[in-house]
Image (cartoon, helix red, strand yellow):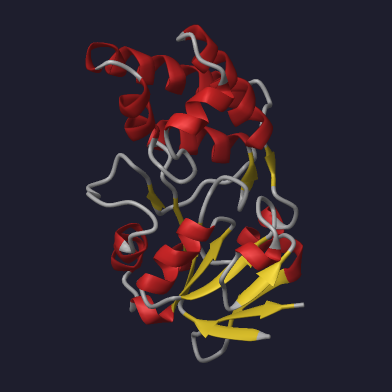
Amino acid sequence: MRFPADALLFDSDETLVSSLRSVKRVWSRWAESYGMTLEEAMARVEVHGRPAAEIVAALLPADQAAEGLRRLIDAEVADALAGGVVPVPGALALLASLPEDRWAVVTSSSRRVAGTRLGRVGIHPKFLITSDDDITRFKPHPEPFLLAAERLGFDPARCVVVEDAPAGLAAGRAAGMATIALTTTHRPDQLDADATVADLTALSAGVTTAGDLEITIG
């Protein structure tokens, strides 16, 4: 299967960098410091794909939210720097084959956390869209992906989204983009996408003589 396009837009966590163990470890300790288990916190608020600031604000009293968010971000950064994250298989090779102005990372993480996790595994995007950008609506809303296309300078219809989560795939579809799903966190039947792969070893990409970006699966 081939996708002619101008750019690839990647989610970060579990799409380019595997951070699930780090996230579980840090969030468990953080929740416990506020008298909750991680399971109790997740039962109180939807966490996947939401900015940490929103989650913290939903879990803590207003007068504790700012300090709670600072402590959480500090802990996530420290865990990543200590080696708590690794690249998703195929991520480094795929990105190395792409010109830096043909891809972007679009994540609901903060710029500090996302930048640290990506940098720790050797990924340094020229274009990084995070929850710290001028975004008012997050995935599954298309706004983050539309902002990425705008900054890259390409028509959204000529961008391909690579995601592991239903909310991210829904955001890509709403932006009018083709979608490729990774089964790093969800079963294939839970992912609505134009194509589904286990990880990024299944993808290859290159710029054609006509200047198009051609993405190939398999």
Q: Position of residue 10 (x, y in %)?
A: 52, 59
Q: Is residue 33 left or right of residue 95?
A: left
In this rendering, is residue 117 above or below 145? above
Residue occupying image coordinates x 77% and y 77%: 218
Residue occupying image coordinates x 38% and y 55%: 139
Q: Is residue 81 visible?
A: no
Q: How many marks?
A: 0
Q: Position of residue 134 (x, y in %)?
A: 22, 47
Q: Is residue 5 left or right of residue 186?
A: left
Residue occupying image coordinates x 34% and y 75%: 154
Quadrant of residue 150 within the rendered picture? bottom left
In this rendering, is residue 168 above or below 111? below
Q: Residue furthest bottom?
A: 210
Quadrant of residue 34 within the rendered picture? top left
Q: Position of residue 205 (x, y in %)?
A: 64, 74
Residue occupying image coordinates x 45% and y 20%: 72
In this rendering, is residue 189 above or below 93? below
Image quadrant for the N terminus?
Answer: bottom right
User: In the depicted view, which residue is nearer to us: 127 or 86?
Assistant: 86
Q: Is residue 9 visible?
A: yes
Q: Position of residue 121 (x, y in %)?
A: 65, 39
Q: Is residue 180 left or right of residue 161?
A: right
